[in-house]
Amino acid sequence: MAAKLNFTSKVRAGMAVERVSAGERLAEADVVNIAQREAAVVTQPEEGSAQTESHAVRQILVEDVVSNPYNPRAFYSAETIDELADSFEKQGQITPILVTHLAEFPGKYVIVDGERRIRAARSRGDKTIEADVRDGLDSQNLYLRAYHANKEREEQTVFDDALAWKKLLDERVYVDQVELGVAVGEDPKHISKVISLTSLPPLLLQRMAQNKTDVGLGHAYNIKLIFDRAGASVAEHWLDQVIEGKATVRKLEAAASAEAGARRIGPRRTHYQSRVQFNRPDGVALGELKLFGDGRAELSLTGIAPADQQRLAERVKAVIEQWASEMETPETV
């Protein structure tokens, strides 16, 4: 009996030791986990420091932020930027921008997602912005992360896709439309159709993007065909019809077919009587203004950065409105 008690006592003692040992191991694991979590909270490194992290949220200087060279969005509404700036004023920045480092932008933070937020911060004159810094992203990651983020927020349009996809293929980020289609989950035929929209004048494309709720890919593609066959003024007329709810995709298809038939019969457009050409100070051509005998005038410009298009449109509008007001008020003799 004594031997049995001895054996039982030893077993119980052993179990107690095991419990203590397991508790110690759990405690040690908790300490490690806490240390790892604390190590993940990284402060802004001092200027000149070589310290880099694969993932860290911090305050960074607004002046050190540059746009995503493969930004999937090309069109931004000034009104939405103002609204976001107002939200910053009332609620502060809710979501950090996502940035990374690229060798071609030394010492800078490249935006992966957050172009609207950085524009709002700049409009307010903010010196810093909260950012989630992710290193180790290549060009494809840079595009796809931003692309899917915009898709989830329903901010991405086919007009943004048109410019972004063309650039990705031009710069060989993706070798062809098939590889790009696999990356974004779209049929290569769809990608080809969307990219064809880039042949439209930038201002026409921007108007479509600004009216994205009324202008879908079917509308845009047929307006592109009309533009190819009849020119900008006819394309703008049909875009106005779409925005006003007076033209369906089927009606545009009929108009595009009619223009194709008229083109086969022969040209019916009046040749311009004179034109004014525009160049940058370095001599690079920007476009031209054509004047026609039937009273029409066509302005065509190229090479305008998306960020400058809205400002240019506002200035052109102001000039035309001023001219129109002078025409409405004839001089008294």
Image: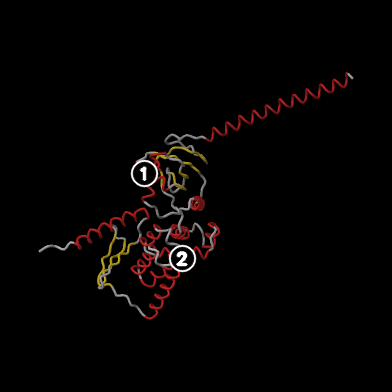
Q: Which residue is mark 2?
A: 218
Give the residue drawn at x 38%, y 45%: 120
| Badge 1 amino acid | Arg
- Secondary structure, mark 1, is helix
Callout in the foreground (1, 2): 2
Give the residue drawn at x 51%, y 58%: 174
Q: Quadrant of the N terminus?
A: top right
Foreground pick, 116 / 80: 80
Residue that lies at the very extreme toward the bottom in this rendered image = 265
Report crowding for label 1: few under 14, some 14 to 19, many 20 or more residues within 10 A (C-alpha): some
Report crowding for label 2: few under 14, some 14 to 19, many 20 or more residues within 10 A (C-alpha): some
User: What colouring method underlies this structural image?
Assistant: secondary structure
Q: Which residue is mark 1?
A: 122
Whichever of labels 1 and 2 marks the residue nearer the N terminus, that label is 1
Above or below residue 73? Residue 24 is above
The image quadrant of residue 8 is top right
Q: Position of residue 82 (x, y in %)?
A: 36, 46
- Secondary structure, mark 2, is helix
In this image, 12 relative to 312: left or right? right
Q: Which mark is residue 99?
A: none
Distance of label 1 from label 2 (alpha carbons): 36 Å
